[in-house]
Image: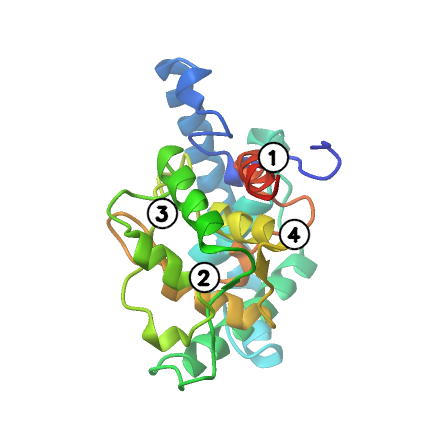
Amino acid sequence: MGKDKKEYQIGTFSDSLGTGLANILSEDKIEIARKIVADDIKAIRQDVLEQINRLGELLKDEVGAIPRTEDLADWMFDKKKIWETGNTIPKITDKEIIQYAKEYVASLKMMIHQSGKPVKGELQVFQWSGPQEQLTALYNRLIMDGFIGSKTSLEAFSAIFSGCDISNIKEKIIWLKRGLNKRLNKKSISDFIDVLKENNLIVPISTPSHLLSILSISFRGIDSETKFTHSNLVKEESYSGYRMDFEKIATTLIM
């Protein structure tokens, strides 16, 4: 995995980084890392608040809505590279604010559209491309490696990859991984799906808005529901700390 393609970000700097920080760092150093993350989040939120106060009315008039400060701060946090911390955190630019505002409005429109029960046949979940035995092997590996909870049944896991109408989904996949900010690591879920797609293990979803709906309906945290936005989707050089793990798992499935 080349550094030029998958540079880890502080925003997705997680409790694993692929092999488990507990196996690499002492608890004292992990606490120091958490303090760094907390300080960075505070600085980013202050910067975002100042810029929203400055540009809010313009965004409302030109784009259609003013993004929530916390959501925009989380988006900026996820964009940071691991060395962009403390005094080296870049200030948010007007271009970035406008970019996020457009994504925010698109996400709002999608959620409004999907707020009711999905129309039958309108939206399908992921379609697994291989045999059921291969999907079962993936399920067992994700439980063994601590990505999904053991309370997630094989039936529920298989349903997410059955290609069926999403309105038929009754049980969500319980995702366990969290970042150092102690929130559900949604970028790792997006990364997981992206790796499956890249390795032709699932049929790609037609549009980003459909993908967001499917992820929101299909996955949850161990103690909370979750909603996905465009900022949670992976992009080039914007991957989670679990990318190598997913690529290794995919390789074992297709060998």
- Please report contact status of discs 1 and 4: CB closer than 8 Å, yes or no: no
> Between marks 1 and 4, how big is the CA–CA gap?
19 Å
Of tags 4 and 2, the one toward the viewer is: 2
Where residue 100 appears, as percent x and y from the top left, is: 59, 62
Q: Which residue position is annotated with label 4?
A: 198
Q: Which residue is mark 3?
A: 175
In this picture, residue 15 sits left or right of residue 13: left
Distance from label 3 to label 1 (Cα)? 21 Å
For the residues labelled 2 and 1, the Cα–Cα distance comes to: 28 Å
Residue 210 or residue 32, whichever sits in front: 210
Q: CA distance from mark 4 to mark 3?
A: 21 Å
Left or right: residue 216 versus residue 101 is left
| Of the image marks 4 and 3, the number of the one nearer the N terminus | 3
- Above or below, 81 against 107 in this view is above
Whether residue 48 is visible to the viewer of this picture, yes or no, is no
Query: Is the C terminus in the top left, top right, bottom left or bottom right quadrant?
Result: top right
Q: Which residue bears the numbered disc 1? A: 8
Q: Name the residue located 44 percent from the left edge and 66 percent from the top edge.
A: 162
- Judging by the rendered image, the residue that carries numbered circle 2 is 161
Spatial distance from mark 2 to mark 3, Cα to Cα? 16 Å
- Look at discs 3 and 1 and give the one toward the viewer: 3
- Residue type indicated by callout 1: Tyr
Q: Secondary structure at mark 4?
A: helix
Mark 4 crowd level (few <14, some 14–19, many ≥20, 10 Å Cα): few
Name the residue rendered at 62%, 36% in the picture: 81
Q: Amino acid at mark 2?
A: Phe
Nearer to me, 112 or 131: 131
